[in-house]
Amino acid sequence: MRRMTMIAVLVICAGTALLCAPFIGMETISPRDLFRPGSEGFKPEIFFMIRLPRVITAFIAGAGLALSGMTFQALFRNPLATPFTLGVSSGASFGAALAMRTGIVFTFLGMSSLSLSAFMGALLSILLVYGLTRARRGFSTATMLLAGVAVSFLFSSIILFIQYMSDFTHSFRILRWLMGGLEIVGYAPLVTMLPFVIAGAAIVTLMSNELNLMMTGEDIALSRGVDVKNVKRILFFATSLMIGGIVSVCGPIGFIGMMSPHICRLLVGTDHRVLAPAAVLFGGMFLVVCDMIARTVIAPAEIPVGVITALLGGPFFLWLLLSGVSERGVFARV
């Protein structure tokens, strides 16, 4: 009963955030003026082409990052795992940095050259991690984690080299993109990202029972009939592609995938059949609120939303490490 009550509260809070956020920004738009031509507050272009797609994109991106973080924390049985643990963010950042440094601009199937390059970089990172893991003749969690860390450091060093070899303009653009942001116009970025998030979310939801069993340990999961290697492979590709799609549009927005699942476990427990929808609602709501703060706190200028999430995530990370109520204890009781 308590779990369903918390889900209902999250639905109400997420719905409120989605309804209110498009009206709040550098200039507040009144709902009464939205459909009244001639009124001083009549700004349909700002509302429908900038605010609304930005808020929806923020919610979908936050939901996908939270769901990915929940999946990786279950796979690695570690509450500090994040959607970027396996180097997908670094790969996408490398692709974006390369596109900005070369100055190549084009559009393909509605995707800009920057987004396409970022997604290809994320895909390259996924394939490298998978190849390195398979090279050890298995698909062990430890090997996958080490491969992800190695690939992440590799791409991070290449990005630093690209920045060093760039002029001031290119270097600033790269640095700004690495902060993460939602400065989008229109619905094309949302359409680009949505298929990856929907497909990844569907796969994770369908495998929520397998995630419950895998959190008890791989040996126990095997004894219950779970094909552990196949499940890990499917979840690895599904969540990594989901992260790649999100990062290619929004940049590397950190800490949401680490904070949201942890908070939701405290609210609804560790059963992934309930935890997954809770993480989707909380993660989406959290990024919408953070983006609303980012575009209003120093208006008319904007703060990159990745800076806001990092400012909140840093203290939370320290609390998670130092708190007596450690998530490791919750994991151990599963």
Image: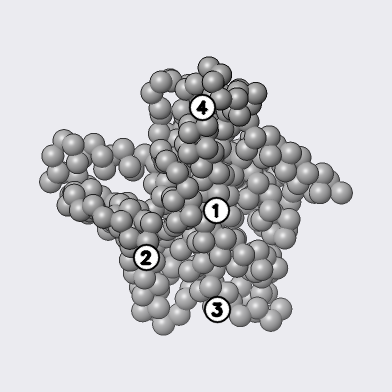
Residue 64 visible, this angle: yes
Residue 92 visible, this angle: no
Question: Which residue matches tag 3?
Answer: 230
Above or below, comparing residue 181 to residue 70 in the picture: above
Quarter where residue 206 is shown: bottom right
Question: Which residue matches tag 4?
Answer: 43
The kind of residue on which mark 3 rests is Asn
The kind of residue on which mark 2 rests is Leu
Q: CA distance from mark 1 to mark 2?
A: 17 Å
- Other-residue count near label 4 (Cα within 10 Å), few / some / many at <14 / 14–19 / ≥20: some
Earlier sequence position, callout 4 versus callout 2: 4
Q: Secondary structure at mark 3?
A: helix
Earlier sequence position, callout 3 versus callout 4: 4
Where is residue 315 drawn, in percent x and y?
Answer: 51, 33
Earlier sequence position, callout 3 versus callout 1: 1
Q: For the point 26% across and 43% down, which residue is it?
A: 174
Q: Which mark is residue 22?
A: none
Question: Which residue matches tag 1?
Answer: 64
Q: Secondary structure at mark 2?
A: helix
- Contact between marks 1 and 2 (CB within 8 A): the answer is no
Q: CA distance from mark 3 to mark 2?
A: 20 Å
- Tell me the quarter of the image containing the C terminus: bottom right
- Other-residue count near label 3 (Cα within 10 Å), few / some / many at <14 / 14–19 / ≥20: few
The kind of residue on which mark 4 rests is Lys
Where is residue 247 drawn, in percent x and y?
Answer: 41, 51
